Image (cartoon, rainbow, N blue to C red):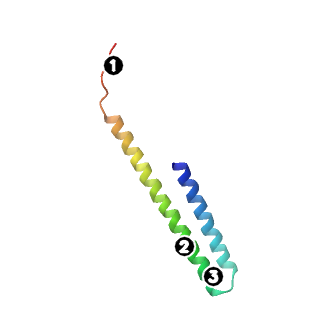
Amino acid sequence: MLQKLEDHIKACLKRASDAERRAAEVADPDLKADYLALAAQWIHLARSYEFSESLERFLLDSQRSKDAQRPRPPETE
C-alpha cells in the first residue's frame, strides 16, 4: 500500500508541475489563473496522500511495537 501512495504522490506532483508550466506559457490571465488553481489542487491532493502515508507508517510501526512487547507463550518440548 505504501508504494502505491508514493506513486500517487509522484503523479500528483508531476501534474501540478505540468499545470504550473502551462500557466507560465499562457498570456491569458484567466487561463493562467485556472492553471495555477489546478496546480494548487494537485499539490493539495499530494499532501493528502502524504498525510495518509505518514498515518499508515505510524499505525504499522505502532502495531510492530505492540507485537514486539507482547509476551510469547513458553515453548513446549
Q: Amino acid at mark 2?
A: Ala
Q: Residue at x 60, y 69 (%)?
A: 16
Residue 69, x across and y down, in percent: 31, 35
Q: Residue at x 44, y 49 (%)?
A: 57
Which residue is labeled 1 in the image?
A: 75
Mark 2 and mark 1: span between their CA atoms? 57 Å
Q: Amino acid at mark 1?
A: Glu
Q: Are marks 2 and 3 in contact (CB under 8 Å)?
A: no
Which residue is labeled 2 in the image?
A: 40
Instruction: Relative to 74, say whether 59 is above or below.
Output: below
Mark 3 vs 1, N-terminal side: 3
Is label 2 in a helix, a strand or a loop?
Answer: helix
Which residue is labeled 3 in the image?
A: 32
Mark 2 vs 1, N-terminal side: 2
Q: Is residue 66 left or right of residue 38?
A: left
Q: Is residue 23 left or right of residue 73?
A: right
Q: Residue at x 40, y 49 (%)?
A: 58
